[in-house]
Amino acid sequence: MGRVGNTSRRLSTVFGRILRVYSLRLRLVFGSDPNASLSPTRHLDRSEALKIVNIISVQSFKGGTGKSTISANLAVTLAQLGKRVGVVDLDLEGPGLHVIFGVADADVKATINDVLQHKAPVNQAVLDLTSRLKLKDGYLIFCPAGHKLDEILSILDTGFNLYTFKRILEDLARDYNLEYLLIDSHPGIEKDTLLSMALCDYLVLISRVDQQDLFGSGVMTEVASQLKKPVVLILNMVPSSVNEKEASKIADRLAELFHLRVLTALPFNSDVLENLSKGVFVLEKPKDPLTKRFTEIAMKMLEAIETGPPDDPSTTQSTSQPVA
Ligand SMILES: Nc1ncnc2c1ncn2[C@@H]1O[C@H](COP(=O)(O)OP(=O)(O)OP(=O)(O)O)[C@@H](O)[C@H]1O
Ligand SMILES: [Mg+2]
């Protein structure tokens, strides 16, 4: 039990207090009753466009957990499986996906910041990466975020609202006939991550096997449950010192504690780090065991989306895999 037992005890102790703070933040963003304001009969009615697409928000409590890496690799893997996929970089404070996808400034006519600020139509912020990444089956479009200081400061100053963001997602889904729309997010629980959580169908939380991360993932899961969103957790960068049995125990304990599915546990892989975010791992290392793991994650996600969220998440079993 050792490390696992200590982790869960500490998580449980401080959990309730911190959760109250985030419930308050939820109310500040959505009004006095988050559930009522997000009821299907209110302004978040799903349009025809949003009924077709599956919106997946990739989030984490702490920074640097691997959100952008996993968003890019999952998006490419889903496209390789023949799906029509869109990715939006909504990390407006620290955009990074354009680097992983190898997008040069000259390729970008407009960014998602421009669209959110009504300075450009959404199609101007769309880059079709299908042929550039030599994807043979499905397709992949990408909306980059502005990475210049003035763009970042400007959007932080103005912010954006739920309706504008929802309309952008609808336009993307409809105009590009998308099946899956991934949103890469800023870490933490801020207004934009809450909006992304509110509009998504599935929340993919990324966490390291670190007590701060795990604790934060628990808080985020609770916030997501207030918004009635199904959550899956991916443990990332699991150190080699945590063996297969231990990783699996941690996954089971987390599933039980936080009522979520642990989709998988990805090992720390020095090739990913050494790649310096200069490319999409699954394309550069198609034969690496980690690439196989991304295919497994994508297939599990497709299966989970097809079967729908469990009726009672507390009965959900961890579906974690051994750390390769
Ligand atoms: N499984 C892994 N093994 C080793 N390194 C990894 C792994 N996953 C991601 N990394 C590396 O960790 C760093 C952070 O990853 P990434 O930028 O994807 O995190 P992030 O959650 O998007 O960060 P931020 O919160 O700043 O947006 C990158 O250098 C990336 O290459
Ligand atoms: Mg990132």
Image (cartoon, helix red, strand yellow):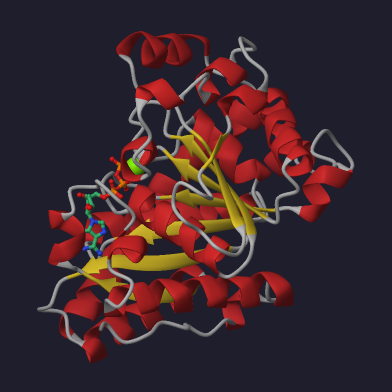
Image quadrant where residue 138 sits: bottom right
Which quarter is ligand 2 in? top left
Residue 218: image x %, image y %?
A: 42, 59
Quadrant for the N terminus, please. bottom left
- Classify 314 as above or below 170: below
Rendered image quadrant of residue 255: bottom left
- Is 271 placed left or right of 83 in the picture? left
Q: Look at the picture and state if 286 lies above or below 28.
A: below
Say whether residue 91 is visible: yes
Q: Nearer the viewer, residue 99 or 128?
A: 128
Q: Residue at x 46, y 44 (%)?
A: 184
Left or right, residue 224 beside residue 43:
left
Q: Quadrant of the C terminus?
A: bottom left
Residue shown at 40% from the left, 37% from the top? 186
Could you say where residue 131 lies in the image, as x and y percent from the top left? 51, 49
Residue furthest left in the image = 241
On the rendered structure, is 258 left or right of 209?
right
| Above or below, comparing residue 218 to residue 45 in the picture | below
- Where does the image place residue 20, in percent across and percent down from the top left? 48, 43
Tell whether 297 sits left or right of 138.
left
